[in-house]
Amino acid sequence: MDILYNSTRSTGDPVKASEAILRGLSEDGGLFVPDRIPALDKSLEELADMTYGQVAYEVMKLYLTDFTEQELKECIAKAYDDKFDTEEIAPMVQAGGAWYLELFHGATIAFKDMALSILPHLLTTSARKNHVKNEIVILTATSGDTGKAALAGFADVEGTRIVVFYPKDGVSKIQEKQMITQKGKNTYVVGIHGNFDDAQTGVKQIFGDKELAAYMDEKGFQFSSANSINIGRLVPQIVYYVYAYVKLLKEEQIKNGEKINVVVPTGNFGNILAAFYAKEMGLPIDKLICASNENKVLFDFFRTGTYDRNREFMLTSSPSMDILISSNLERLIYRICGNDWRKNKEFMDALGEKGSYAITEKMRAQLADFYGNYADEKETAETIHELYEHTGYVIDPHTAVAACVYEKYKKETGDEKPAVIVSTASPYKFTRSVMDAIDHKYDAMEDFELVDLLSERSKVKVPRAIEEIRTAPVLHDHICEKNRMKETVMEFLGI
Ligand SMILES: *Cc1c(COP(=O)(O)O)cnc(C)c1O
């Protein structure tokens, strides 16, 4: 039976997976959620003999039920190919008493690649299935990382164009270089005079412009978003939890059915929600350990039952987790209030109006599988340092937040079950923070000098993504004022 997708904020008509992917967000502002969580229909032993792509098919087919076998297999084949620097796609490394699941072997060496390399194909397939004739134009505002991952995913994908706006003086030099050297005749990268909020506000205005949408339609275009709340980004993330478990099984590190803990460095709550779905599908996961940096809204939420974004925003060395509103948490809230959209909407309205809400005791009781904690900046750097000193393995600051929280969890609970720590970025993506944590004497060095030193010390080859930008020519030099974003998009589309 087909799985249909409901909005978390109204009864609306449930939609098929392909429609949910095309729409991204429901018109009422809610997120699409599957009407039930399917159970795995292959045994863990069967899955253990499969490649990453094969596991991806077995998991994703259960959610994207209106895709044909051929459609889904094609999407998977186009996504998980030699854009990744290892055939395993998501390899695991044992270090310091845990397994690190490395999700950074894709084009931009961070975990967003796991979903953004397949989303363009899911999106174009969905457009075809729903008889959309228009070319899809992806609009993204970025503070650095998502923009590059989206560009890499959509570059030269037939039937799509992508426009990325970034704050001209608000991203790191390496991040800017990564974006402005992006190849692909359908890509357009624009620096704006303004900050990230200006870029985001501008993009939201373009999305909300009904007149523009009608004009675009006339010219054969329509907008879409690669935002992390798209179900087409969530579903591919369930795959690597299943893959990790069955690899441990195959390598006889665990017994069939033995429970493991997973530790996830969390920002928008997408990655850990995927782990929760994997558990609900029958994967033997015990605790879902949610690791935050100093922006510890989620830690406070798990401890007190109150979600409160009214606090100072901290800039940390794990910037992809510098978030005060974890959008994907809404899917969990909806579920623990009994899939009741009215109740969920009350919470979300309160979040919008006063910046906080408190869940009931009955809802809290359903969060027993989650454990939340956080790591401050000092602890994060110490974790990188200690792991390197003891094992030679180098992790990035996001992963270090998770590793630190895992140690706190073990100390607090004594739970020593096998654990998978999700490694969300290559240390090469945050070379300066990483090298500084290893030794302060590197402070004064140039970025690329640090890259070479990291390679020397970690004995890990410099990834292609970094090697390329040393010499890659600049292909984008567009700059625009923050109030000219719409005109800039139209110019790019030639309309
Ligand atoms: C996006 C990101 C995260 C946070 O993932 P969520 O799904 O938003 O919780 C963690 N680490 C890195 C490196 C990221 O890019």
Image (cartoon, grey):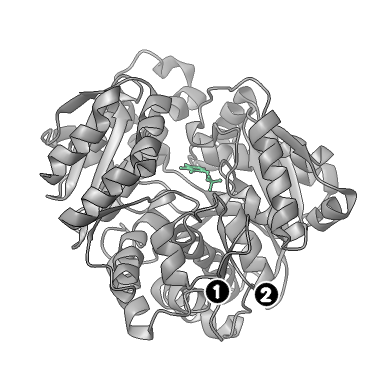
Q: Quadrant of residue 280?
A: bottom right
Residue annotated with mark 2: 282
Q: Position of residue 90 (x, y in %)?
A: 44, 60
Which of marks 1 and 2 precedes in the sequence?
A: 1
Instruction: In this rendered view, identify the residue nearer to me: 209 or 103.
Output: 209
Q: Is mark 2 within 8 Å of ligand 1?
A: no
Q: Which mark is residue 12?
A: none
Give the position of the C terminus as an image quadrant.
top left
Location of residue 286 with respect to 437 vertically, above or below:
below
Q: Residue at x 71, y 60 (%)?
A: 335
Res 406 seen here: no
Q: Position of residue 341 (x, y in %)?
A: 69, 57
Residue 135 lies left or right of residue 6; in this view the side is left
Q: Residue at x 57, y 40 (%)?
A: 267
Marker count (numbered): 2
Residue type marked 2: Gly
Residue type marked 1: Leu
Q: Nearer the viewer, mark 2 or mark 1?
A: 1
Q: Secondary structure at mark 2?
A: loop
Q: Residue at x 31, y 60 (%)?
A: 120
Residue annotated with mark 1: 4
Give the position of the N terminus as an image quadrant.
bottom right
